[in-house]
Amino acid sequence: MVPQCPPIAMGGLGDARYHVRMSEFIKVCSASELPDGSMKCVQASGHRIALYNLDGEYFATQESCTHAEASLCDGEISGDEVVCPLHFATFDIRTGECTGPPAYEDLQTYPIKVEGDDILVQVEMP
Ligand code: FES
């Protein structure tokens, strides 16, 4: 017997088994707006994102702390970490890894690319 692929949309359009999320790179700011050692909050397709410039390298994480949703953009950069302004949890900016309590969940990170002076972040489309 020859194996067959399952029929597409077995359960109709609402069938989550076949839901494919599309993602896209979206321009969120200019590199000139984000000097070395700074961070900036941006939005892209409904995602609130914190952008960072560490020695000319750009990184993007979710904007809200995983502990109690404080805005990390109100915090501080310390080395390669961002420190939450509310209860001082720390996260590795490069990986999103939680490095200090009271938070314990990592931050979501987003791929970035730079085109000329434009910084683009890859986000899932709604
Ligand atoms: S809200 Fe960030 S550590 Fe509590």
Image (cartoon, rainbow, N blue to C red):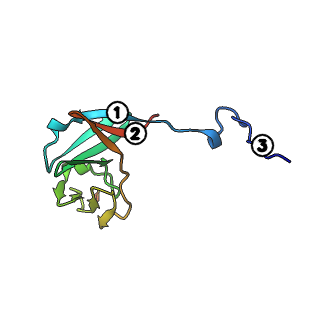
Q: Quadrant of residue 103?
A: bottom left
Q: Mark 2 or mark 3: which comes first in sequence?
A: 3
Check if mark 1's residue and mark 2's residue have beta carbons within 8 Å: yes
Q: Disc 2 marks which residue? A: 123
Label 2, label 3: how far apart the Cα atoms are: 33 Å
Depicted 121 relative to depicted 96: above or below: above
Residue at the spot 71% in from the left edge and 37% down from the top edge: 11
Residue highlighted by disc 1: 26
Q: Amino acid at mark 1?
A: Ile
Residue drawn 26% across the image and 63% down it: 89
Label 1: which secondary element: strand
- Residue 64 visible at all: yes
Q: Residue at x 14, y 51 (%)?
A: 37
Q: Is residue 117 left or right of residue 43?
A: left
Disc 1 C-beta below 8 A from ligand 1: no
> Residue 32 placed where, x, y %?
15, 36
Marks 3 and 2: in contact by CB < 8 Å? no
